[in-house]
Each structure stands twice: as C-alpha cells, then as structure tokens.
Image: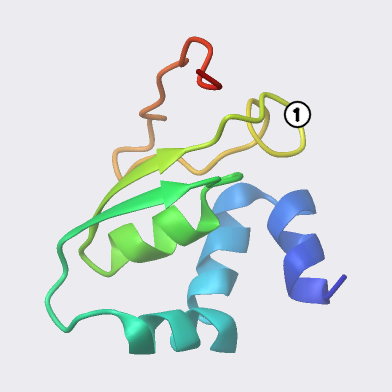
Amino acid sequence: MSALARAAYFDEPVAAALRYQASAEFGAVRALLPPKAGRALDLGAGNGILSHALAREGWAVTAVEPDPSELVGAGQHVSNSSGNPNRRKLRNASC
C-alpha cells in the first residue's frame, strides 16, 4: 500500500484530503474532468477525500459510502465546508 493510500485512512481526515488534492493522483483525475465544475456522485466514498477535493474545486458532490466500519464509513470522515458532516444513514442499500 502506498504511503498516500495509507495516510488517506489513518491520518486526520481533512489533512489527508488536502494532501490528496495536492497529489499527482488527483491531478490525473482533474485532467479528466470538464473545465466547468458541476455535480458529482462519489460512490464508495470512503472517508471522503475525493469528495473533499472535488468540492474544493467547485463541484457539488454527493458522497455515498455503504460500509459502516470505523475504518471507512462510520468512523472518520471529512466534513462539509461549514465543518459539519452532511450525512444520512441509508436503510438497506443492498436492495
């Protein structure tokens, strides 16, 4: 596992998200995006580092993470720009 990937899960979430936004990996993603920001759906969002990076670039992002584990879903996550998590618990999403 790369140091960037490990840090995405084990470092403080906002610091990990900011580091990801500055990474070559996100640079490659950015190169594939249209020049005008719009709406994005991040399925399997984990702790939200991609969602956070996209939002900082002006995208309106909806993040969905079905894994309730402390490592990925219910534990650490990046908050919205006001500092408050904007999360809803989904009922059985496997239907």
- Residue 93 versus residue 22 in the image, above or below: above
Report which quarter residue 52 is drawn in.
Answer: bottom left
What residue is drawn where x is 82% and y is 74%?
3
Q: Position of residue 30 (x, y in %)?
A: 37, 82
What residue is drawn where x is 48% and y is 73%?
21
Colour option used: rainbow
- Residue 61 versus residue 24 in the image, above or below: above
Q: Residue furthest top?
A: 91
Q: Which residue is mark 1?
A: 70
Residue 65 appears anywhere in the view:
yes
Report which quarter residue 36 is drawn in.
Answer: bottom left
Q: Residue furthest front?
A: 95
What residue is drawn where x is 57% and y is 71%?
20
In the image: residue 82, left or right of residue 85? left
81 or 41: nearer the viewer? 41
Amino acid type indicated by mark 1: Glu
- Residue 25 versus residue 6 in the image, above or below: below
In the image: residue 28, left or right of residue 80? right
Residue 23 appears anywhere in the view:
no
